[in-house]
Amino acid sequence: MLVVTLQRQKCIGCNYCVEMAPAHFAMSKKDGKTVLLHSQDNKGFHTFKTKEHVLEETFEAAAKACPVHIISCKTT
């Protein structure tokens, strides 16, 4: 299982994650912060789980591009 977590409250709105993975991240027009699409919110931690390990490289690229390091990607 691939688990991706976004700490949305700490987002600075740089848009790098959207550039790296536009199918999985979007910028909110409401507050200018990123949204992890199809994720579950748990007190500011947005989590997306998938069995598709082919997406790991895409999410890791987004995590590395984030200047505030609020995206984590791990396999369980």
Image (cartoon, rainbow, N blue to C red):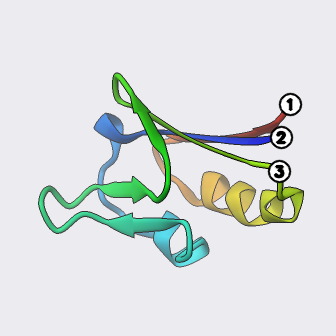
Q: Amino acid at mark 1?
A: Thr
Category of crowding for the residue at label 3, using alpha-carbon neighbours closer than 10 angstroms: few (below 14), some (14–19), many (at least 20):
few
Question: Relative to residue 45, is residue 44 drawn left or right?
Answer: left
Camera-near label (1 vs 3) is 3
Category of crowding for the residue at label 1, using alpha-carbon neighbours closer than 10 angstroms: few (below 14), some (14–19), many (at least 20):
few
Q: Position of residue 9 (x, y in %)?
A: 29, 36
- The residue drawn where x is 83% and y is 58% is 52
Q: Amino acid at mark 3?
A: Lys
Disc number placed over residue 76 in the picture, else none = 1
Q: Which residue is mark 2?
A: 1
Mark 3 and mark 2 in contact (Cβ < 8 Å)? yes
Q: Amino acid at mark 2?
A: Met
At mark 2, the secondary structure is loop
- The residue drawn where x is 27% and y is 55% is 33
Q: Is residue 25 above or below residue 39?
A: below
Name the quadrant containing residue 5. top right
Query: Which mark sits nearer the N-terminus, 2 or 3?
Result: 2
Disc number placed over residue 43 in the picture, else none = none
Q: Which residue is mark 3?
A: 51
Mark 2 and mark 1 in contact (Cβ < 8 Å)? yes
